[in-house]
Structures are given as C-alpha cells and as structure tokens.
Image: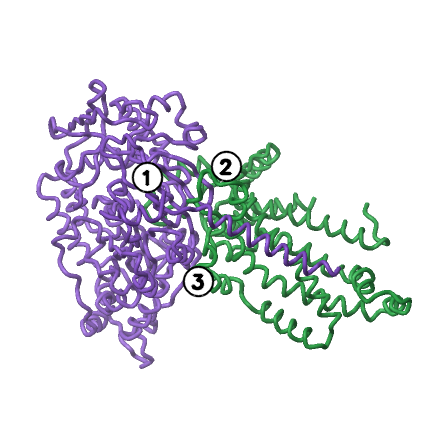
Amino acid sequence: MTPWTPRIAIAAVLACAVVTTVGAQANRGRGTSIVIVTGGQATLPIPTLMEGAEASVGNLDVADQLFLRLADLGPKLLTAGDSHFVPALARSWTRRDSVTLAFDLDSRARWHDGTPVTARDVVFTITRAKNPTVAPRLSELLRQIASVTAEGPGRVVFRFVQPYAEQLYDATFHVAPLPSHLLDSISPTEMRRSAYVTRPIGSGAYRWVRNVPGQFVELAAVQSFFLGTPKIGRVILRTAADASARLNLLLSGQADAMDIIPPPPENLRRVAADSTLRLISVPSSTVGYLLFNQRDPKNRARPHPVLADIRVRRAITLGLDRRQLVQAVFGTQAVVPYGPVSQMLWIRHGAPEPEAPNVSEARRLLAATGWGDSDGDGTLDREGRPLRLLLSLPNTSGVRRQMALLVQEQLRRIGIQIEIQQLEFPIWQERRTAGDFDVDFSSVSQDASPSGLTQSWACTGGNNVAGYCDRTVDSLMTEAIVGRGDPAETWIDAVRQIEEGAPAAFIYAPTFAYAVNRRYRAVTISPQSSWITLRKWSVSQDQESHRGK
Amino acid sequence: MTFAVALGLLFFLMRAAPGDPLFRLSADRPISPQEIKVLRARYGLDRPVGEQLGAFVGGLLRGDLGVSIEHGRPVTALLAERLPATMLLGGSVLLLNFTLGLWLGVRQAVRHGRREDRWLTTASLTGYAMPSFWLGLVLAWLVGVEWRLLPAAGMQDPLMDADAGWLARVGDILRHLILPTATMSIVSIAATMRYQRAAMLEVLRLPYIVTARSKGLSERLVTWRHGWRNALFPVITLFGLWLPILVSGSVFVEAVFAWPGLGSLAANAVGSRDYPLLMGASLLVAALVVVAGFLTDVAYALLDPRVRLG
C-alpha cells in the first residue's frame, strides 16, 4: 500500500458522491405521475393468458389499465341482474330473451394503435377464452355461454346455456376483449411467446410504455381515450415483494400509493402518522376460517372420529372469542364474518350477526358428546383418549400464525388441546387438497360473484376438501344461481344453513387499508380491482405546478 | 463431471421433496382439476420423471431451461434479466470486501496489540455478529425513511427523466446500491478482516520476514511485498467460497431493499416448487462454484511458484 492509497480512497468516495448527487438531480419531480408500489409484478397482463400463476394480482392490476371490459361492475359490486353495471366498451345492452343478451359497442372505442374496437374482437376473444387448452380457468368460468356472434361491426350477441341471474356478469367481467386484427394470425398456443405480449396493445385508458423486469411497469395515459383523457399522465407500478420494503418505499416518499398495508396494526399507525398520506379502507375479498375435517384423514371412507359430530364443531366455534382474535391481529381492520362471506361480496348486506362466544354452552355440548376431564389435567378425554386436534396452516401467513396461537390458548380453556402444525406452503396445500388434516386454517380470496361459494361448500365443489355435504345448502345455492326469485335472500338462506352446519369457524373478513398521497384527488378504490378507477383520479393543481413537469 | 452430478442430484431431490408446484397456484383461489391437468401437461409434469430429465437435458444442450411455472416465462430470460443486478451487488460487495477488508486486516496485524488493533477487532466482531437482515431493516428505515439520505429500496428511480444522461443514470444506480452493499459488506468485511489479520500475524512471525527487515527494507515493503503476498492464501480460499454465496445468499438483503436480483427469485422458486426456475438458478450457482474453484487455483498458481496449473 502506497502513500497514495488514502488519497485514492478519498477521491473515489468524492467521485461517488458527485455521481450520486447527479443521479439524484435527474428526477425533477412527479408532476402528473403516480408511483404505486405492489407486491407482484405483471409478467403477462394479457386477457386469456392469465391462467395458472399468471392469474396474479400483478397481472390483473396492469390488465385492468390496458384493457377495457364491455361493462364494469357498479359501486355496489352486484353481480346478479342486468342493471347494476357501468358501460365501458359497450355503451348499452338489451335483453332479447331469458338466454340472449345483445351489446352495442361504443363507436368511439379505439385500440391503442388507432383501430376501432369491433364486435369481431369480442367474438375472437370469447372463442379463445372458451378453449380449455388455452384458458382452462376462463373456459370453466364461461361455460354457461353457448355462443357469441357479431351482428355488424358494432353489435355482439351472447347466448347462454340456461337462464340465470349472472349472465351479464359472465359476459363482461371475466375477460376483456383483445385486438383480433393483431392476434388472429397468431395461434393460441404461440400467443404467449409472441411479440404482442412484450408490448401489448389494448383499449384501456393507459397504454404500455415499458417493463423493467423485477422493478416496475410503466404506463402512459391515452390522450384520445374515448371515456375522457386520464388526468394522471404516467403510472408506474413498482414491485417490492417484501412488505417492509413496500412500506419503506411509501414512507420514504419513493412511492405515492400502496395497496394492502399488512398487519400488525403498528404499520397502519406509521402510515397514519405521515401527514402526506391518506388511508383508505377497502372491503377485501378475503375470508379466513378454521375448516373442520369431517372425514378421517387416515381413511377418507370413515367419518372423522371427533369432528364428524356437529356438536363438537359447534362447541369449538362457541368456545372461540372471534372478535378478540380479530381485534388482536387486525385491530379495526377486520370483522367476524357471518358464514364464508367476505366483505366484498354483495350478499353480506342483510346477513345476520355472527354468534357471540358462549363458553358454558360449548362445555355443555362437549359434555353431551361424552368428552369430560376424567383425570383432571385440564384436557377433555373420552375412553382414555384426550381431545387433541392438529391445526394445520402455511408458515407463509403471519396473520394465521399469530391467530393460531390465540386459538390454541382460547380452546385450551374449554379443554381442547390444539397442536399447531406450520407447514411450507406447497406441503400444506398438498395435504389440504388430500384431506390430510384435522383442522385447517384456510384463507380464500373470493370472486365478486357469490356463485364461487359452490367451490368450497357444495357437496361436489372442487375445493371442498373437508367432506362437508349438506343437500339443503346445495339446493339453496342452485336456486340462488339459476332460480327466478330474489337471489340475495336465497344466498343468505344458504349461508345461514352453512353457519348452522358448522363446517368451519369463520374467523376474519378483513378490510384492506390502502395508502395514497394526499396530492391525488377524486380517489376511489374498488375492491374488485385495486386501481381500476385510476383514470378518474386527478392531481392537486398546487402540488402539480410546484413539483413538476 | 461435477456439473453433471450436481444436475442429476438437483433434479431428483427437487422432485423427491414434498409439495406439488401446481397446488401452489391455488393459494388464493380454488383451482379446478381440469385446470391442473392442462397446466401439468403444459409444463411437462404429467410425464415420467426419467422423461422429464431427458427433456431437461435436451433443452439444456440447446440453451433452453424451460418455462418458469411461477412467472410463465423462459427461465433463461428470467436469469438473464436478474443476473446483472446480482452481479452488480455481489461485485460491489466483493470489491469492498477484498480491498477494505484486506487493508484493514493487514493494518490490524501490523499494529498488533495497539489501540487501533483493539478498536478494529471490536468493530469487526460487532459487524460479524450483526445479522444482515436486521442491519438491512435498520439502515433502510434510518437512512432511507427517517433521514431520506438515500433510496430506501429499489435499483433505479422509475421517474428519472427520459433524457437523463449516462452519468445521471449511473449515479442513480449507485445511490440505490449503497445501502444493500453496505448491509452485506459490513458483515463480510468483518470476516475478511479477521482472516487476513490472523494470516498476516502468522506470516509476520516467520524468519524470512526478519531477514527482510535485517536487510534494511522499509517496513512498508516488508509488509506488503513480502508478508502480504504469503498471507493471501486463506483469503483467496475465502474468496472462492464467497463468490457463489454472493449470488445465492443475498436473499434477505434483496428482499429488504427490493433489489431485483437472483437471490429472491431463487428463494421464491423454492417456496413455490418452481422446478424449471429452481434448476436454472441452481445450475448457475453450480457453475459459479466451478468458476470460483478455477479462479482460486489460478490465483494460487500466480502467488506461489510451487503451484502449477494443469
């Protein structure tokens, strides 16, 4: 080492300081831009291709900016009937009969390359979406659509397999039209490798600018957008998988908005303490519950030795102080749901209040089934066997980990021993699917439509892993979906029947807290898709002129 | 050979581990058996394991590592996108580690027993004892959020002017690089200092150093030309071990600073059982182990005339 070494070191540090200062000066402000930090980056935000892992929130968020649906859900998120939807690509629709809907497209609608949006684009997209080898998830969702035909360039007619309440929802919500003039020469199987997916052209309020992998996606406002030029000119969807990194980006001013401030409540307090940020509560589609296995995990042909008895399941539910659990983990950002109904589902309106805890009734029910504390050790037993249950959960969920400990403690007080089994996510999921659990701490994200409840709570539902089967529930749900009566009341009856059967203890239905910088005006956030209303937001004039370009 | 054994082991061990990559997809929403069937066929998971290995090796020979189940994109493209960020972070850490770490280690040995040595020993032990994920959280919060001196996360400012020059862009990346580099370096420099100090103390006691001094050579020449050269071997071994770890072992730091590198990509691939991506990332690390071993051997040969390559 020479006498020059310290000088070289000082020179290097000074050079770095100069260069970093230059780097810091290159950003002249936000102007009419917005930086949104999210957990997952868009990898393939293309309708019909968002299958499997690509059906991610990151992709859906970007796709909702790039592509416009025929119609959007209204503010009440009502999926039944034809009257609660908001026109988008379709300026209007008419019902021809109980199985036919005709949509008139808005003649002003254009693809980002200037080509008009036509009925041919809708037919092309639905045809692709109904192909099970291309889009297995979508084809299942669109199974009730019998045919789609174009009547001239501006009208498209949907025919359905049978009359049911959510025809308009199925026709408009699941998939947004794609530009057939750019894609019909590309085979469905080649589409995900085509140049189109690297620079998608849509019909939405924002157009694609660039994707910096692992960092952000940039979109720009379409100045000629037919429903009004967006006031926010530039949208950056910035990715940070780690929740603390997202929070730091927000609190350091590197991001203007963030979806879903994660628990613990301390995070909310930190955001609330920042005067530049505004917190917005949004009903979430998530519902968390303790699912009771009614079949023996060791032999699915036999009933579960403990949980097949409805009295034990009800005792567990009554033995839990669910409000206390929710308060401890979420603070005010969640409620105890009535049945498997998230805060986003429209059927929650008019549903009864969840049952309050009742420890003495829980003890009575357990005693009635022969469980007693014969040896005085605090744990109930029957025929020499203690009342011990395995509670399985994925180790990736901090919320469920915290709650499991509280559940363990609350049930210990009524003599039930809970052994917590935290599993790596794929292993947990594999065991859950195989029905290899006593009690599973489940959490699902629900569709806007209550018909998704059949997946978990109908006897033959694809996600019914606990062997729950109540024919009354099945018939009520079928009646709610295809019947001609008021679906809301029928759905509430079905949910009430589920509650009474106690297939699960429904624990939490959270409200997600979003944070948005106060310089943005007219801010609304839809539970259905976080940033879908972005085109209607604006930027405070004062701050815009102060800060930027 | 090393590579082939690593490849075979990785392939079979991954599939032997419990957990199906497609069940991961039903994390939030129910996924139908029909959807699972189509996806299984799409990713070749419905074929026998031997056939899957054959397809993988065939693809590997063509430079095709398959399509990531989690990202739906070619693995080679994903790795190519993330590798520069990892190399930049890892390279910066290595550079600091093997300049500052070595210099401080030698300085400690030369000033053995004095106040500076004791102070640096305390500092290095403190640095070594600090978990990098904790240090990262503290630095991000303090420097990025509270003081707002440097970016709290990310690799570049997405709002940078489109017409910004190269100097501004380099400066922007450097600003983002400082905190993750500091987080990783504080721990690794401490280790290098300890190794270098111990090796140097060993060498400075040897007779040829006494001879060099008795010949009237300056202390600087004795230390750096005669002593340091021979005290480098343990540190070179350390360098060989560090190189692959810097690619795969920066998971926490990448997560805390939202650094778009390979570490977090590989860690997520483990959690989601994304076999193709996991294979790709593992092969890259295996290749780095081989490269690091080769570089270490070359360095030995350069420093010690008794060691010959071949």
Residue B74 numbered tag: 2
Binning the other alpha carbons within 10 Å of mark 2 as few (below 14), some (14 to 19) or many (20 upward) gives some
Residue B71 at x, y percent in the picture = 45, 41
Task: Please give the letter of the chain rendered in green.
Answer: B
User: Mark 2 or 3, which is nearer the eye?
Assistant: 3
Any part of residue A461 in sight: no
Q: Secondary structure at mark 1?
A: loop
Q: Residue at x 63, y 65 (%)?
A: B190
Question: Chain A is which colour?
Answer: purple
Residue A122 at x, y percent in the picture = 27, 26
Q: CA distance from mark 3 to mark 1?
A: 30 Å
Specify whether A341 is left or right of A443: left
Q: Amino acid at mark 1?
A: Gly
Binning the other alpha carbons within 10 Å of mark 1 as few (below 14), some (14 to 19) or many (20 upward) gives some
Q: Secondary structure at mark 2?
A: loop
Residue B184 at x, y percent in the picture = 57, 59
Specify whether B97 is left or right of B36: right
Q: Which residue is mark 3?
A: B147
Query: What is the chain letter for disc 2?
Result: B
Q: Residue furthest bottom?
A: A376
Q: Earlier in the sequence, mark 2 or mark 3?
A: 2
Q: Residue furthest top?
A: A152
Q: Amino acid at mark 2?
A: Pro
Please say which color scheme the image uses: by chain
Q: CA distance from mark 2 to mark 3?
A: 41 Å
Q: Is residue A26 above or below residue B153?
A: above
